[in-house]
Image (tube, grey):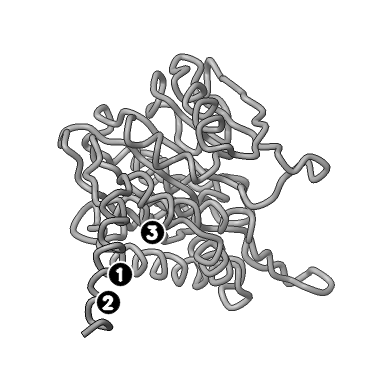
Amino acid sequence: MKRKHLITVLMWCVATTLCAQTPVEKGLKSINRQAAEAYIGFLADDELQGREAGFHGSRVAARYIASLLKEMGIRPLGESYYQPFDAYRKERQQKGRLEVHPDSIAKLKQVVHQKLSMNNVLGMIPGKKTNEYVIVGAHFDHLGIDPALDGDQIYNGADDNASGVSAVLQIAKAFVVSGQQPERNVIFAFWDGEEKGLLGSKYFVQECPFINQVKGYLNFDMIGRNNQPQNPKHVVYFYTEANPAFGRWLKEDIKKYGLQLEPNYRPWDKPVEVITARLPKPVFPSFGIIPTVIPITISLLTMQTV
């Protein structure tokens, strides 16, 4: 009888503790090193052969990411998690970059050309404001293999950009665990073909019917390695100068949560001209963009107010 009573008391204590946690606290507690290592370990494994866009390793990575979104209970943006697209360019004897715009493709089809088939992976959590969107994104492709290299021939891409993908996946999971509906629709975007010319994000922009309703974008790229190892607190933080709230939020949260970070704040008045912005000019001429490193523990806090 005493044992049953003790179990009941313990269950009540656990339930009370869980209820006492705010949605943000619940979400933040779901972000952990073990998950990060698992995501990065899979994506950067030799079996994926460097995840070159348009090839087998990148397709495996896309399916892995989609399966994780499905397991989390995050619905696809459209009918499928995949947004397939083709990129064209002139055959290898002639110089030319890969193109995804239909006008460019129409011209390239008239000559001898190359074609690569790729897939963005897109999931979404519906928000209270159903006609407004924010996007959290990272590219998942990398450089593939180089048979001419002496020794290890695989560009595994753990930092570039399995680390960014891991951040977006953990943020997605945190939103689910929080149990709170976001203010706006939150799209979790995983771009293909970034290393070949920002192809996945370009295609998304030109095909997105609600692009003018996108209110902000957070991008994660190469966040797994500090470029100043002598300063372990160093982090680079880009944001749109016209939207200073993005810079203010990070400063406030560093103080509030006691984060051991000393950010290099880089406000840009024309962030769309920065190649790391990942989305081309038509997208965010006046919205907040964080195109490189941002600590993932901050993002759930930020996205609830974006």
Q: Is residue 110 visible?
A: no
- Of 204 and 85, nearer the camera is 204
**Mark 2: few/some/many CA within 10 Å (<14, 14-19, 20+):** few
Q: Which of the marked residues, 2 or 3, is nearer the chain's N terminus?
A: 2
Please identify the residue farthest to the front as the structure is shown.
2
Specify the amino acid type for callout 1: Leu
* Nearest to viewer (mark 3 / mark 1): 1
**Gap in angstroms between the C-alphas marked 2 and 1:** 5 Å
Q: Are marks 2 and 3 in contact (CB under 8 Å)?
A: no
CB atoms of marks 2 and 1 within 8 Å: yes
Q: The disc labelled 3 sits on which kind of residue?
A: Asn
* Up/down of 195 relative to 34, above or below: above
Residue 235, placed above or below residue 142: above
Instruction: Judge by depth and name the residue closer to the eye, 260 or 147.
Output: 260
63 on left or right of 38: left
Kindly state the secondary structure of the residue where label 2 is placed: helix
Q: Quadrant of the C terminus?
A: top left
Mark 1 lies on residue: 10
Residue 71: x and y, percent? 30, 69
Q: Residue at x 30, y 46 (%)?
A: 23
Q: Residue at x 43, y 18 (%)?
A: 243
Q: Are marks 3 and 1 in contact (CB under 8 Å)?
A: no
Residue type at the position of mark 2? Ile
Quarter of the view holding residue 206: top left
Q: Position of residue 16 (x, y in %)?
A: 26, 56
Residue located beneath label 3 in the image: 119
Q: Which residue is mark 2?
A: 7
